[in-house]
Amino acid sequence: MIIANSLVKSFGDSTAINGIDLQIKKGECFGLLGPNGAGKSTFINMMYGTVQRTGGNLSVFGYDPNIDSRKIKKRLGVVTQENALDESLTVFENMMIYCSFIGLPKLDRKDRINELLKYMNLSHKKDARIQMLSGGMKRRLVFVRALLGNPELLILDEPTTGLDPAVRHLLWGKVRELHANGTTIVLTTHYMHEAEVLCDRLIILNHGKIAAAGSPQKMIEEHTPGYMGIFSLDEKETIKKILSTKNNFIHHEDSSGIYLRSSTLPELTSIHSDYGLTPLQIRPSNLEDVFLKLTGQELSIDA
Ligand SMILES: Nc1ncnc2c1ncn2[C@@H]1O[C@H](COP(=O)(O)OP(=O)(O)O)[C@@H](O)[C@H]1O
Ligand SMILES: [Mg+2]
């Protein structure tokens, strides 16, 4: 459905996307992960021609977005990074304007809006002005807007950034439902856990390049297999002693603690029985660990 080959986007001297190859299949939930400024929005915006690529090839539904952006836009819905709602109008008025913008048949508009407001638990806010809505309600409304045209491809640019956990979990449920019903989804996020929960496959973007690609599980198995024990920074001396006698731990530290990774759980729990050290946490390693490793932020304890 989406094919990128050696895709490049430069803004003057700076390169936001620096030679990306990827394919996204129909029905997939595909994730673009990466820190702020990694190039996620730039990639998304190139998919429907809002940003014009400066090198390589890109095809969406078989069309070139630099040429046929209108044909592409008709078939997709976007939850943009910024809400871009008219604050002075009501929920219903905002959605009506969008219906006419995308050319939805007049007779269908009201029913479609009501149906989607209900789906996103917003029916009670139909006549409220946007400025009266909470951040989470505005975000749910942007989902409504993205779904009005019944898109086969749904693009979500940081859909849950800044939202509280309850709204985040509600939106995750909706995304999973849409995915289960066959909608293809492309999602950007800097929340590793979000990508792990939602995506079939993903890439980690860093400085406009792909740092890693695959299913969340495969990436963890490949780059940071095993379990992570997190210890208090106060235990530094004891941990140095452990590391001098046992060399099967991968370790790094940051301001939140000292991290020891091992391929087996017993190896980590033995630290408690052998040295009397109680970890703050022991957990299976996750995508955040992969990300920290690949972006060079996993430092040696001596660094
Ligand atoms: N219109 C623009 N003009 C100049 N530079 C831009 C523009 N849009 C994005 N950039 C730059 O491209 C890089 C990637 O930005 P962006 O795609 O927004 O990252 P992300 O969405 O991953 O946070 C950043 O360094 C950003 O400053
Ligand atoms: Mg962005």
Image (cartoon, grey):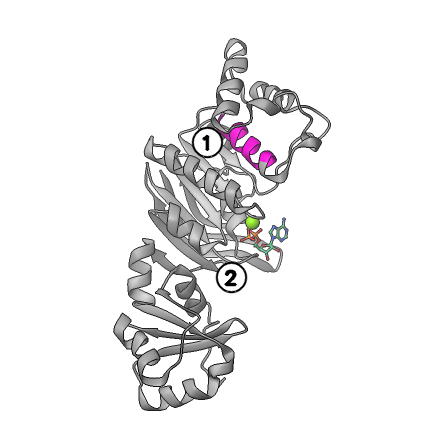
Q: Which mark is residue 170?
A: none
- Vertical comparison of 221 with 115: above or below: below
Residue 294 in view, yes or no: yes
Q: Residue at x 56, y 46 (%)?
A: 164
Main structural element of the magenta stretch: helix, strand or loop? helix
- The spot of residue 121 in percent (x, y) is 52, 28
Amino acid at circle 1:
Leu
> Which quarter shows the N terminus?
top left
- In the displayed structure, 211 sits above or below 303; it is above
- Disc 1 or 2, which lies upstream in sequence? 1
Q: What is the number of the mark on residue 207?
A: 2
Name the kind of residue labelled 2 in the image: His
The residue beneath circle 1 is 76
Left or right of 223 in this view: 93:
right
Q: Position of residue 134 (x, y in %)?
A: 64, 37
Q: Nearer the viewer, residue 11 or 154?
A: 154
Check if residue 145 falls in the magenta segment. yes
Which span is picked out in magenta?
A: 137-147
Residue 187, x across and y down, in percent: 45, 44
Q: Residue at x 41, y 50 (%)?
A: 195
Q: Is mark 1 within 8 Å of ligand 2?
A: no
Residue 99: x and y in percent read 56, 20
Q: Nearer the viewer, residue 56 or 280?
A: 280
For image coordinates 33% across by 62% down, the residue present is 220
- Within-10-Å neighbours for mark 2: few <14, some 14–19, many 20+: some
Q: Is residue 46 visible?
A: no
Nearest the eye: 3 or 96: 96
Quick one: SS at disc 1? strand
Q: For the residue carrying disc 1, how many other residues have a C-alpha within 10 Å: few (<14), some (14-19), or many (20+)?
A: many
Element at badge 2?
loop
Along the line of sight, the residue nearer the viewer: 52 or 240: 240
Horizontal arrangement in the rendering, residue 85 relative to residue 254 (left or right): right
